[in-house]
Amino acid sequence: MCGIIGYVGDQRGDTDVLDVLMTGLSGLEYRGYDSAGVAVADSSLAVRKREGDLSALESAVADGSVEGAAGIGHTRWSTHGPPSDVNAHPHTDADDRVAVVHNGIIENYGSLRDELEDRGYEFESETDTEVVPHLIADALSGGVEPETAFRRAIGRLEGSYAIAAVFSGSETVYAAREESPLVLGVGDGGHYLASDVPAFIEYTDRVIYLDDGEFATIEPSSVVVTDDEGTVVDTSIETIEWDAEDAGKSGYDHYMLKEIHEQPTAIRQCLSERVTELEGCIDVDSLASVSVPDRVQFVACGTSYHAALYGTRLLRERGVPATAFLASEYDVDAVPIGDDALVVGVTQSGETADTMGALRGANRVGATTLAVTNVVGSSAARECDHAMYVRAGPEIGVAATKTFVSQQIALVMLASELTGEYGDELVAALRDLPGKIQSVLDASAARGIATEYRDSDAFFFIGRGYNAPVALEGALKMKEITYRHAEGFAAGELKHGPLALVTDRTPVFALVTGGSNPTKTIGNVKEVETRGAPVVAVTDGCADVERHADFVLEVPESHPALAPVIANVQLQLVSYWVANQLGRSIDKPRNLAKSVTVE
Amino acid sequence: MSALSAVVLAAGEGSRLRPLTRSRPKPMLPAATTPILARVLDELVDAGVTDITVVVGYRRERVQSYFGPTYRNVPLTYVGQRTQLGTGHALLAARADVDGSMLVINGDQIVDRRIISDVVSAHEGSDSVATLGLLRRPDVGEYGGVIVDDGGRTEDDPSVPIVDLVERPRDDRDYLLNAGVYALEPAIFEAIAETEPRTGEHSLIDAIAHLVSSCDDSSPPVRGVESDGLWVDATYPWDLLEVAAELFDRETGGSDTDGRGRQARPVSPSASVHDRAIVREPAVVADDCEIGPGAVVGPYACLGENVTVDAGAVVEHSVLDTDTRVGPNATVVECVTGQRVEIGADTTIPGGPGDVRVGDRVFEGENLGAVLADRVRDEGGVTYVPGAVVGPNATVRAGGTVRGTVVEGTEVRS
């Protein structure tokens, strides 16, 4: 889960290589930020890298000594070796002939390293990546050209990678991709490569998506894509519609709060031209050719997994057997899959390595695959048989908010479209949802409740039915950004163990909305009330839970499947305000990155 | 001024527009189907402004979430005015974000781009500390009045010295209307700081008046430039009907956008209009609206985003804001709704003159069917006596009759 950027200027423009690289890295910071580095080539190689966030690297390059025609950069999130200057990318060979940046994991790096060390190559870092420059140097020493050396080195690698390299005395950036995201940008004043489009969207919106096994040679005047044999591959240039402008915080202190407030708009975008109330229909173009499956398996991680859990319930309620799997457990779980199954990957970025691994496994056994993702043209969207976009717009905050609600709404439409089972009430309720979430944003009591409970020992979240995955998500959000202990439970499960954790210093957030058997949940609320725990009821007033609550977070009445979607917004706000009052790094919580592209 | 900075004042609630401002400030109320502020930003962008600072305060999230970090590729910077202590105080909030000359404009009034261009070109190259946009209007009494020294007019300068500024003038001097468009030099910040606040508020007008009164031969003058073009201000909720009508009747020139930077169309391509529905122009139907069979929308009907007009319903001379739903066979005439209002089946809002009570004042004979604030729900078969004003979250039971003012959150039974 690192980010890489590369740029070759065409000399006509006055775009400074270092400026492009630094801008690119700041656009990729969401992918990791424990160290960063750049390498720029002209007659020699200049490499600068620093532990810490981008500002450390910025001061290291401020002296203006880094100049050249071609450059690469990297922002890192540690997988092999702790964050340090030495472990930061780019990595070079002993003679500084080549510099390499890498995103992914080289699985056979141990044996490659042993082999190279036996032959006298000395390693400086603890990273898997460092084998690459040494392999390239080894080939160069054999007398071959840089491109051949690069290809030979890549040919030795097993695992996942997006790799870019620059050579001393050359104006070319070489790149290769295998199971890690890599996109090329075609500009007027030069050409780009990056892990993700926001890195260079400021300069160009014309992109080429590289496929697995492909190589790219980027020169001042050309971008050439080849296969592993060196044969030129026909590529198409696509135009991206996202604007760089979407990256600003628009007056909010944090992207997370901005994105929480963008949820009504995100839902409108998700629903637009897919639902018609007066004709009582839900019609998603990209699902038209998906037939009703015998069973559905969701694969997802983190917040997307909670959306998937919500999705399984929607499908089961409509008579389709559906199960959600943690993507990282899918292959080891010995899940029986076959061509009668629809495997749905829920992934915001469309690049999540665990989810991609599970989807690729499903593709191999002939299951129909469907990606539910936010990123057009992402690996998931391209590799699955079908793709449905959630249309939330770019999300920068590491803690997912608006993409979760958009995933939920997309899955409501998915379940409805696949089965044809939905009523007029559901369609009307979907169209009312943005306004109802707006009412919550206009008048939430979350901030005061956060003040009241921010110093608690732990936070518990309970809910039943559609509220159960929301309870899990509420706890995950709290953990991610406040660093406080938080757990979510199906309400009935509390008494089977976790109740032992409940004290007067552990507030319990109880999700009680219509249709989720609220009276039973109230029984569970009484269990914690008796133990002296403060109770915050998140409720539409359906079951008089207020009588047992210290505070109430109000949820407008809605369809039973949608009220929990609204309730979740209240929990997002509670977590945000607790984190805010504790002074946490809300948009970039410690140890976390937005898009997890390692397994 | 190749780089042209503007400061938009959008922090005030606009309390005379209550109950519509319960959850959002006046700049976010609908001018036809888009926020008033979107129209202001459109005119600024069309006049060539290259960066915009928006001063936000009351319910600022509504402004920020709607517009985001840029508008039609022009960057927006938001600065917060924590407490609303007048327009001068609001401008001070933007002090750190502007340097050099700036264009300052009210975010809650719609002005023609010609007024903006006239002010900019008159100010450019002049020695004025402030240049105000002025209009010749018969009805200055409700707004800001400006007295100019016509003797100070020169042949090659369209602007004239200003000698006096009076808010809501009551005397019969020859006042021009202050259009709320100002080109200002940074000296204005000192003037605001030096001017005594009135009833606790630092007014930008008072600060400019202070510059006028302290002006001598050696100091830079305050001038105004008389301009021409559309200028609309909604003072009371029912004025939103008039604002929409003026926008419909305006000669369209240049680019008119739909408030999200796209070309405006009478019916959005994402709206769903039944084959047997009739849209009578002028009318505007925004994104994701639905109009059922036999419904008649227009003339002078504005349907905001995601509005539903069910079968057989009639909507004319009305401004229905986002997510409003009109039930089957309802009649809605001269009506202003807030967001997510539900007008039930067979309800009748006949329109026509009625007396409207606002606080202690009664406005007699206003053409107003009803003002229904955010999330008002009527259960159907309801009749509204002209001039009715219903507060947010109120419920009207089926078959009821609504007259006069209904306060927030109450229930009207038949």
Image (cartoon, grey):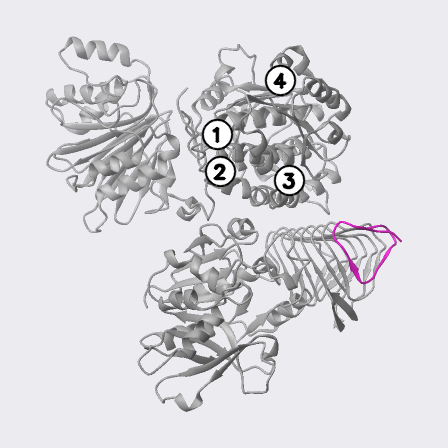
Looking at marks 2 and 1 on the same chain, the residue that comes earlier in the sequence is marked by 2
With B172 as the anchor, is A135 left or right in this view? left
- In the displayed structure, would residue B195 be above or below residue B65? below
At numbered mark 2, what does the secondary structure look like: helix, strand or loop?
helix
Looking at marks 2 and 3 on the same chain, the residue that comes earlier in the sequence is marked by 2
Amino acid bearing label 2: Met
Are the residues under marks 4 and 3 on the same chain? yes
Q: Are marks 2 and 1 in contact (CB under 8 Å)?
A: yes
Place of residue A404 in the rendered image (x, y in percent of width and height, measured from the top left): 55, 33
Image quadrant assignment for residue A522: top right
Quick one: quadrant of the C terminus of chain A? Answer: top left
At numbered mark 4, what does the secondary structure look like: helix, strand or loop?
loop
Amino acid bearing label 4: Thr
- Say which chain tag 3 marks: A
Q: Are marks 4 and 3 in contact (CB under 8 Å)?
A: no
Q: Which mark is residue A256?
A: 2
Q: Are marks 4 and 2 in contact (CB under 8 Å)?
A: no
Are the residues under marks 1 and 4 on the same chain? yes
Nearer the observer: mark 2 or 3; the answer is: 2
**Label 2, label 3: how many angstroms apart (C-alpha)?**
31 Å
- Circle 1: is it few (<14), some (14-19), or many (20+) Cα within 10 Å? many
Place of residue B53 in the rendered image (x, y in percent of width and height, measured from the top left): 43, 58
- Say which chain tag 4 marks: A
Toward the viewer: B43 or A411?
B43
Q: Is residue B404 magenta?
A: yes
Amino acid bearing label 1: Ile
Mark 1 lies on residue: A481
